[in-house]
Image (spheres, grey):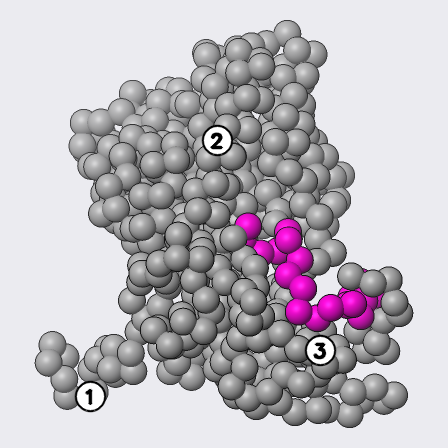
Amino acid sequence: MSASSSHPVAPAWLTVPDDANALAAAVWPASAHRDDDGQLIVGGVAAGRLRERFGTPLYVLDEDEVRTRARRTVTAFAAATSAHGIRSRIYYAGKAFLSAEVVRWVTEEGLAVDVCSQGELELALAAGADPARIGFHGNNKSVAELERAVDVGVGTIIVDSLIELERLAAVAARRGAVQPVLLRVNSGVHAETHDFLATAHEDQKFGFALDDAPAAVARIRGLDTLGFVGLHCHIGSQIFGVAGFAESAARLVDLHARLLEGGPIPLLNLGGGFGIAYTSVDDPTPIEQLAAGIVDAVAQECAVRGIPVPDLAFEPGRAIVGTAGITLYEVGTTKPVRLPGAQRLYVSVDGGMSDNARPALYGAEFSARIASRTSTAEPALVRVVGKHCESGDIVVDHEYLPGDVAPGDLLAVPATGAYCFSLASNYNYLPRPAVVAVRDGSARVIVRGETIADLLHRDAGIAAEGNA
Ligand SMILES: Cc1ncc(COP(=O)(O)O)c(C=O)c1O
């Protein structure tokens, strides 16, 4: 990217690119490149071929990218923890993207699975995940969900409140089980805002305040039906450095050390949240560096207190699947919009906030490239928007694309592997797109796309087979 000056209405971080066809390496799967005709190739499959076979919008997942990232994460934490004579367990945070194939890929690469509803649990089980290697999260698990988790032998349930603690103890008692649990605590570290200052009681719904945790742990330890495995904390998502994790680990180890007076604690789970690149200016910390930094920080905190280092668990989601996914759209219309002293080209695609809610939900930034061709046209500042009846229906808020971007062009938005498919909706009765896995030049559907008939079928007022 050149350092040339920005457009009057572009954000400061977005500079005019030398080449608006270039694929910034950190944002795309490693397999992404352009062929001699300028067409985007992912997992050995041409974007145009994907459009012909499966239509658009389409979620495309590069299997090798998922597997490589999963393996790298397991290896990085294994190396970092074995240096301190302990072990690590990596849970894949299924909320990022859950399908049977993805569960198989990550479990084959050595990951355990973390779920946070009965639906996610059933999917993981149906995909063949070992229940003993499943962690079950959630701040309001129902009795039915807890019963199912205990019945199938879920490895750890992460307890989020006193009410849930008693609810789970009663379920385990009825089932004659002893359920291993972690206690979710709120370390007071706000990673998203880089505000590492302690606030005794964070104003959010998850977990126990640090001060309230000892009483909860004492209660767990006093029950025959629950087994206390350790503390859990998740400080947030899309975190680039070690500092937030290290600060949180320090507070957790302090509590862990005090709780050791009541008995051994084998594990400490520090959650997920490792960041990925969404735009060319994002510079995520390599997983090896993150793993070493976080594990060394925990070991140091333990050494200061003269306590053994517990085994460590982590729960990355985005860092495993985020960069592996791209979304393909077809451009339907373009419209130049005049602004004071500037112009922005609106590029409307055939999906939008129903397949990618993140820009509307959190103001998330993405990037885009024309996938069906390259162009020598001058870069134009564009906003890629969807087809929904919301002006906030933005897919890519700020991007430079070749100025001749036109109806019929295939547009690829990279880094959509996490929290896009899983947050998808049917807003405006748009069917949710299929997910296609690509690998070694072949493509296959791993989640079928919805049809309008699927949507109508749910409406009990429409006469259809199976409707009441
Ligand atoms: C408890 C917990 N663990 C793990 C994750 C995964 O986070 P990420 O996908 O950012 O790694 C989340 C995300 O919300 C979470 O709430």
Element assignment for label 3: loop
**Label 1: which residue?**
462
Which badge, 1 or 3, comes first in the chain's sequence?
3
Determine whether label 2 and label 1 are within 8 Å by CB: no
Q: Mark yes or no: residue 390 visible.
A: no
Residue located 65% across and 92% down the image = 335
Q: Is residue 243 left or right of residue 341?
A: left
User: Compared to 127, does 374 lie above or below?
Assistant: below
Element assignment for label 1: loop
Nearer mark to the viewer, of 1 and 3:
3
Element assignment for label 2: helix
Which badge, 2 or 3, comes first in the chain's sequence?
2
Nearer mark to the viewer, of 2 and 1:
2
Q: Quadrant of the C terminus?
A: bottom left
Nearer mark to the viewer, of 2 and 3:
3
Q: Amino acid at mark 2?
A: Val
User: Compared to 457, does 319 lie above or below?
Assistant: above
Q: Main secondary structure of the magenta part?
A: loop
Residue located 38% across and 32% down the image = 110
Task: Tell me, yes or no, whether the highlighted magenta stretch contains residue 323.
Answer: no
Crowd rating for badge 2 (residues with CA inside 10 Å; few <14, some 14–19, many 20+): many
Ligand 1 within 8 Å, label 1 CB? no
What span is colored magenta in the figure? 11-30
Which badge, 2 or 1, comes first in the chain's sequence?
2
The x, y position of residue 128, in whole percent, is 24, 41
Q: Amino acid at mark 3?
A: Thr
Q: Quadrant of the N terminus?
A: bottom right
**Label 2: which residue?**
74
Task: Tell me, yes or no, whether the highlighted magenta stretch contains residue 14.
Answer: yes
Residue located 71% across and 48% down the image = 283
